[in-house]
Structure formats: C-alpha cells, structure tokens
Image: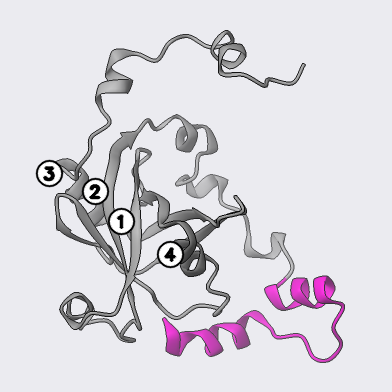
Amino acid sequence: MQIQTTDQLRALYKAPSERAVLKELTHIDTHLKRFISLSPFLAISSGDQHHQMDCSPRGGDAGFVKVLDQQTLLIPDSIGNNRLDTLTNIIATSQVGLLFFVPGIDEVVRVNGKATLQTDSDLLKHFDTLKNSPKLVIKVIVEAAYMHCPKALMRSKLWSIEHHQNIDAMPTLGEIIRDQTKSAGPVESRAEMLERYTPDL
C-alpha cells in the first residue's frame, strides 16, 4: 500500500519523544556554534520553483562556515563545476537545508533557513584568509536548528577505518564520465585530476 496521508504515515510510528521535539531551536546556540566551528564538511539541499530538488557537498577547513550571530550563517561559495545548481535554486526559492558533519563524531547538526546570495565586501571579508577568495557568500537566516541523533552514522560505521573502501573499488572519475557521456579521447587519471584540482583547493 502506498502511504498517501499523514494519518497513514503516523499510524506506522510512535509519537516523537518530548525531547526530540523540544531540541529544535530557532537559533544557533553555544553547542551548535561549537559543532559548526569544528565542521569541515556540509551537505546543502535546495529546490527550485518546480520542486526539482538538489543536494550538494561543500567543504573546507574546519569552521569554513562562519556563525555571524545566532541567526546568521555565512557559507563561502568556493570554486566548483560552475553548474550553479544550488545558487540558482536559492534565487528561485531562498530555501535551504544544511547538514554539518564532524569527522569522528556520530551526531550531525541540521539547519533549515532562508538563503540569499551576497557580494557585499563586509561579508566577503570573513573569508580573506582563504587561498581562493569566493565570488559570493551564501547568507543563511536560521529558522530551525538542532543536533541530530547518531544512529545513521553509527549504523553506517562512517568513521570506522576498518569499513572504508579501497579507492580502487570504483573506477576513476575520468573513466566514469567517459562511460556516462560516451566520449572519446584520453581518460584523466586520478593523479592528473588531483594535479588539476589542487590550485582550486
């Protein structure tokens, strides 16, 4: 049976605990700020006006996302593939969901809010120390923020070295793109890709 209503869905599950409900904040408190300052990686989800969804990884040194105040986060738009999927979605709907990870910690931080694209120098100056200065900053006004329980990362054993795959478990990105695009010509090796990417890191 396809679940089509909230009532049908709720009938399958227990009510959330009081703690699970009360932990959701409308701001960044001391603990969430500390977690974000330790995070070198986040996934940002967004969608356009036609409800076409996207999720994109963002990374940098720990604390690359700045907590400007309790309601405001700044995400530098580092050099990428220039598809601009996230950025065009933000122009369309302003809505984003963020998931912050800290290597070695199984909890994650979830943040939902309204985002805008900013080129103001007073915001860009927060990223003056980066090797490559961003062209713009994603400014997020926090609407909901909370620590997410560790069960998913515990189940996945994400940080367990014993469960990491050898890099050779997958073809190189060059080989994959060649197959997917059915293109001809030389295939870029991992070493060549690393050399090409290094100036943008």
Which span is picked out in magenta? 172-201
Q: In the drawing, what numbered circle is on residue 35?
A: 2
What residue would you read off at disc 4? 58
Q: Are marks 4 and 1 in contact (CB under 8 Å)?
A: no
What residue would you read off at disc 1? 39
Element at label 2: helix
Q: Amino acid at mark 3?
A: Thr
Quarter of the image with the C terminus in it:
bottom left
Please rate how many residues cluster around mark 2, counting C-alpha atoms within 10 Å: few if below 14, some from 14 to 19, many from 20. Answer: some
- Left or right: where does residue 111 sit relative to residue 158? left
Please rate how many residues cluster around mark 4, counting C-alpha atoms within 10 Å: few if below 14, some from 14 to 19, many from 20. Answer: some
Image coordinates for residue 39, horizontal then vertical, percent: 30, 56
Element at label 1: loop
Q: Amino acid at mark 2?
A: Phe
Cα–Cα gap, marks 4 and 1: 11 Å
Discs 4/1, front: 4
Q: Are marks 2 and 1 in contact (CB under 8 Å)?
A: yes
Image coordinates for residue 93, horizontal then vertical, percent: 46, 56
Q: Earlier in the sequence, mark 2 or mark 4?
A: 2
Rendered position, 129 above or below 73: below
Discs 3/2, front: 3
Please rate how many residues cluster around mark 1, counting C-alpha atoms within 10 Å: few if below 14, some from 14 to 19, many from 20. Answer: many
**The image quarter in which residue 171 lies:** bottom right
Q: Amino acid at mark 1?
A: Ser
For image coordinates 55% across by 83% down, the residue present is 194
Residue 20 among magenta residues: no
What residue would you read off at disc 3? 30
Cα–Cα gap, marks 2 and 1: 6 Å
Cα–Cα gap, marks 1 and 3: 15 Å
Rendered position, 76 above or below 30: below
Element at label 4: strand
Q: Earlier in the sequence, mark 4 or mark 3?
A: 3
